[in-house]
Image (spheres, rainbow, N blue to C red):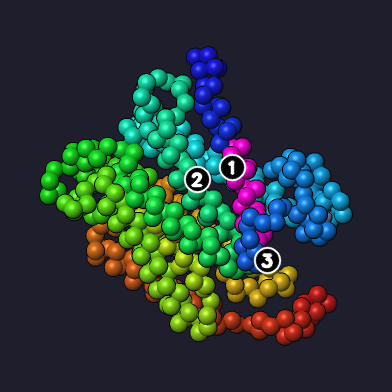
Amino acid sequence: MEWWYHLPLIVSCVWVFVLGLGVGSFLNVLIVRLPFEKSIIWPGSRCGHCLRPIRLLDNLPIIGYLRLRGRCRFCQATFSSRYLWVELGTGLAFLALFGIEIVTQGYGGALGLTPWQDVPGLRNGSGALGAFPPVSAWIYFFYHATLLSLLIASAVIDAEHRIIPLPITYTGTLIGLIGSTLLPWPWPSDPSVLQAIPAGFPWTLPEAGASIPTGATLWPFAGPPPDWAPAGSWKLGLLNGLIGAAAGMFVGRSIKFLFEVGLGRPALGLGDADLLMMAGAFLGWQPAVLALPVGSLVTLPIILPLMAWAKLRGRGSGNELPFGPGIAAGVVVVWLGWPLFGELTRILFDPVMVGLIAFIMGGGMLVAGLIIGKPSEPTSPSERKPQQEAASSA
Ligand SMILES: [Zn+2]
């Protein structure tokens, strides 16, 4: 096999990475301006210190930052390294998403790797190996890359400011509803693949699992879609998006309520519920319901030591949990992992199991609120100082 055989793949990957850098540059604008409710269009990029506009070439992702070593060309004020990391991170995230969803599909097939040429809905018309991904594969990628970009911006802003701006989540929910309507499940797979499941066969049984395809949105229901909204119809797509958004709103607000009852004071912003609503509009109800518990499992081992460290150094009260990054990570894990969870995901079609999970989640948030809400040591800085001095002199 000659190297040029892979040329379309290499060109596609480079293009996706560069696109991610450019999008990351735009996300930086959102991250800097949205928390202060500034316009994201006007004025153009400028130095936050001397307010002089940034030249076009200096504004290039990564290159502009590295060439000037992160400083303003005119007044030498340093720019936050976050600009660099958000650009690079978005570029790498786009590349990873393209690799998982389009190049390998990651699931099924020999060795668990099925290139796009072998995935029914994403297959090239010519079927030729070494060809560029077809248009359907690009649409599939752009839809998910849009969600990924909104999640990155929300996570970074929440980590810095403990807020998730409405323009991101509300615009995102609208884009998600339009997308899930235009790309109804099981797109890009053909709805006829569902005929492999006999009529009246419960989807909760393992035998059905192999025949239920994952589309750009996840499996919508615990059974065949209703007659008035058949698989692949815009009605099913819109219904799926609306149920997802409603599920996110409901779960987010319930968790906020229970956590704050336990804690005894307001803690979670409604931005977290809005973030779940946006993910539900894009993908369906599954990530909206599962993102917080899954995200907690993924991020708490990282966040808790960081919080403990901050507490040791006397920074912050250590009681403020940024839920945004955790929810964003949970959405990504549920969405990309959905086809891999396979058998496990089927329990979500069982009302008893869903009730049990809801009970555990709700109770868990209540208990978590109670534990965090009763600090065993004084938390205000003035009370802590004498302790620290005692510790350092000892
Ligand atoms: Zn300047």
Q: Residue 301's spot in the image, x, y percent?
A: 55, 60
Residue farthest to the front?
A: 42
Q: Gap between marks 1 and 2, in whole Å?
A: 9 Å
Secondary structure found at label 1: helix
Q: Which residue is mark 1?
A: 20
Is 353 included in the stretch rendered in magenta?
Answer: no
Decide if residue 162 is in sight here: yes
Percent across and percent down for residue 360 are 36, 70
Q: Amino acid at mark 2?
A: Ala
Label 2 residue SS: helix
Q: Which residue is mark 3?
A: 309
Boundaries of the magenta span: 17-33
> Looking at the image, is 389 positioned above or below residue 187?
below
| Crowding at mark 3 (Cα within 10 Å: few <14, some 14-19, many 20+) | few
Is 56 rendered above or below residue 277? above
**Circle 1: residue type:** Gly
Q: CA distance from mark 3 to mark 2?
A: 34 Å
* Amino acid type, mark 3: Trp
Mark positioned earlier in the residue sequence (3 or 2): 2
Residue position for label 2: 145
Residue 320 picture quarter: bottom right
Mark closer to the chain start, 1 or 2? 1
Ligand 1: give its quadrant.
bottom right
Q: Position of residue 279 (x, y in %)?
A: 43, 57
Q: Nearer the viewer, mark 3 or mark 2?
A: 2
Of circles 3 and 1, the one toward us is 1
Specify whether residue 21 is painted magenta. yes
Residue drawn at x 42%, y 33% is 135
In this view of the protein, can residue 298 be seen by the observer? Answer: no
> Residue, x 56% and y 59% (percent of image)?
154
**Left of 381 or right of it: where is 52?**
right
Whether pointer 1 and pointer 2 mark residues with C-beta atoms closer than 8 Å, the reply is: yes
